[in-house]
Image (cartoon, rainbow, N blue to C red):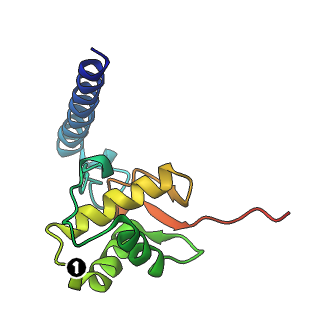
Amino acid sequence: MLADQDKDAASLKAMIIKLNSKLLRTIFDRFPDLVPFEEFPEISSSLRWDQVQLPPSVSEAQIDEIILSVMLPGWRKMALIISGAIERGEELGLKNPDEIFAARIQALVEADRLEGQGDLRKWRHSEVRLKIQAMH
């Protein structure tokens, strides 16, 4: 029963996000002077890491290694990190590597291994960086 509630909650959340996005788009189309940015910050991908199915030849550790190899201590656009990860991970032969890397970055942020700001599903309007370790 809890699984059904979780599924319903996820469906409701997705519907609310889509409604808000479309509603904002409609408002901004009708009243362009209200747009606070040059480009509408659309969701690039809503794929979650728990939905990703890696090929048997690719491990989660390999994905993490590629992502961490293109990260810096300073803030960088999510889109730039994904692009760098795709270049480094070409030999893995992943289907939709951009979405896979994005989903993993979001999972790493949620696990407090990376830092993110903004809605990470909006790649050109969010940023990530290496987690800054507190000095002891």
Dot 1: few (<14), some (14–19), or many (≥20) neighbours within 10 Å? some
Q: Which residue is pictured at 32% across the width and 61% down the height?
A: 102
Q: Is residue 16 left or right of residue 37?
A: left
Front residue of 20/1: it is 1
Q: Residue at x 20, y 43 (%)?
A: 25
Image location (x, y in percent) of residue 70: 44, 80
Q: In this rendering, is residue 22 above or below 125?
A: above
Q: Secondary structure at mark 1?
A: helix
Looking at the image, which residue is at 36% across and 60% down? 104
Residue 79 place in picture, x, y as percent: 33, 70
Query: Where, by quadrant of the figure, is residue 93 drawn?
Result: bottom left
- The answer to whether 39 is drawn above or below residue 57 in the figure is above
x then y, percent, for residue 130: 57, 69
Q: Residue furthest left?
A: 95
Residue occupying the far right of the picture: 136
Against 11, residue 38 (above or below) is below
Query: Which quadrant of the figure contains the N terminus?
Result: top left
Foreground residue, 118 or 114? 114
The amino acid pointed to by label 1 is Leu
Above or below, comparing residue 45 to residue 94 in the picture? above
Residue 88 picture location, percent across and down: 32, 85
Residue nearest the viewer, comparing 73 with 33: 73
Q: Is residue 56 left or right of residue 122?
A: left
Quadrant housing the C terminus: bottom right
Image point (26%, 51%), residue name: 43
Instruction: Please count the marks in the image.
Output: 1
Which residue is the extreme one toward the front?
56
Q: Which residue is mark 1?
A: 92
| Residue 2 in which image quadrant | top left
Task: Give the left or right position of residue 127, taking residue 98 as reference.
Answer: right
